[in-house]
Image (cartoon, rainbow, N blue to C red):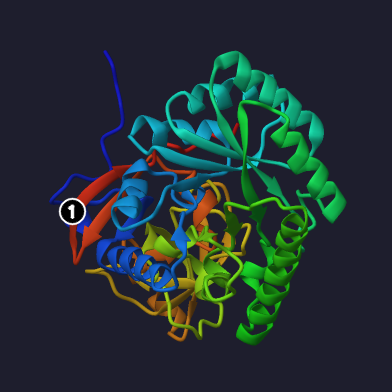
Amino acid sequence: MKLAPPAPARIGDTLACVGTPSLLIDLDAFEANLFDMAAFVASHGIALRPHAKAHKSSTIARQQIDAGAVGICCQKLSEAYPFAAAGVTDIYVTNEVVGRDKLAMAVELASHVRLSVCADALLPVKELGEAAASAGVTIEVLAEVDIGQNRCGVATDDALLELVDAIGQQTNLRFGGLQAYHGRAQHVADWSAKKDAAGRAAERTAAFVRALDARGIRCPRVTGGGTGTVEFDVASGVYTEVQPGSYVLMDGEYGGLNWDGAVRPRHSLFVLATVMSAPRPGAAVCDVGLKGLAVDAGLPRQLAWAPGSEGPALAYIAANDEHGKLEVIGAPAADTARLLGQRLFVTPGHCDPTANLYDQYVCFRGDRVEAIWPIDARGLSR
């Protein structure tokens, strides 16, 4: 006999019928984020290439492209496969390609989609060029520059020029431009300080563009930025393309920043949880812990009662493998027992790794499940 767990939700269910923990998308907020960002970026004459590592769902990627995105970003080559299989034809892997397994994936993907990748060293460029030539495919390569992240990327004009020359020497590679991303700038809490950080990153990027111009090298694409700095990136006059990812879902980390610009995404992603234990006055336990909620950005700071549930304010104070410890605040401790079985919306601190823990999004509008979208790129991290 073949046994399988039942599906956590079916289209048409009320939220009260959805199994927990489940990863929810509020469709009203999601659609507002989808179209607001597309319109905002387009109004500045900049291309939008959302980062699919945030959601890992080809269903969402197709909606982003239908809303005006020129393609998507992926962070890993294996992650790109479900998107290519779903008909996404322009994929940029914002990472270096090093190793035989990566070369094999790159040339296979390039035979199906317009593929672009990053490079910051000469040997991988040579190996990628040879692999592409052997397979008879062309791959676009962007030189990654370090604009303050202190992670990947060349840091000097001379290193950049040497890298671009190396790309040009490979007949099956095409120089695609610059990858210029500063991740830490995305999470600066103070709006003015974030504006300054984004401005410094844009100026470093512009300096690299000027170095190419001085050599007579055309830079077709200057791509970077993200959800946290997008309002400054599109206005900088430096980037031709921006890569926000989290905006369509939002999370506790981004939601806690000071948003003072023209675009203000809403939380659309929640983990639905059930209070499964209330053993002591003032304390309760829900059924989502480390295996259903990423805590790299801290414990969840926003909890709300799901439709049909109610109770006092709660604080999420500790995450174990399968348990979330809750503290009752602002109510008599004796009221705790009545929380048993009540259901919570938990806003994850970081959407990307949280999405990677689930097989599907349960998408609702009002109190009703309207769609179920597979997270078909989850676990693909090569």
Residue 106: name its quadrant.
top right
* Residue 90 spot, x, y in % from top left: 44, 41
| Residue 301 seen in the current view | no
Q: Nearer the viewer, residue 26 or 301?
A: 26
Query: Judging from the image, what secondary structure is the residue with disc 1 in?
Result: strand
Residue pictured at 57% horizontal, 32% vertical: 139
Residue pictured at 23% horizontal, 58% vertical: 364
* Residue 56 spot, x, y in % from top left: 44, 44
Compared to residue 375, the image places residue 5 above or below, namely above
Which residue is the extreme one toward the left? 12
Q: Nearer the viewer, residue 319 or 38?
A: 38
Residue 141: name its quadrant.
top right
Q: Nearer the viewer, residue 238 or 52?
A: 238
* Residue 78 spot, x, y in % from top left: 53, 31
* Residue 38 spot, x, y in % from top left: 37, 65
Residue 229: name its quadrant.
bottom right
State which quarter of the image contains the C terminus.
top right
Residue for badge 1: 370
Mark 1, other Cα within 10 Å: few <14 / some 14–19 / many ≥20? some
| Residue 126 seen in the current view | yes
> What's under tag 1, amino acid-wise?
Glu
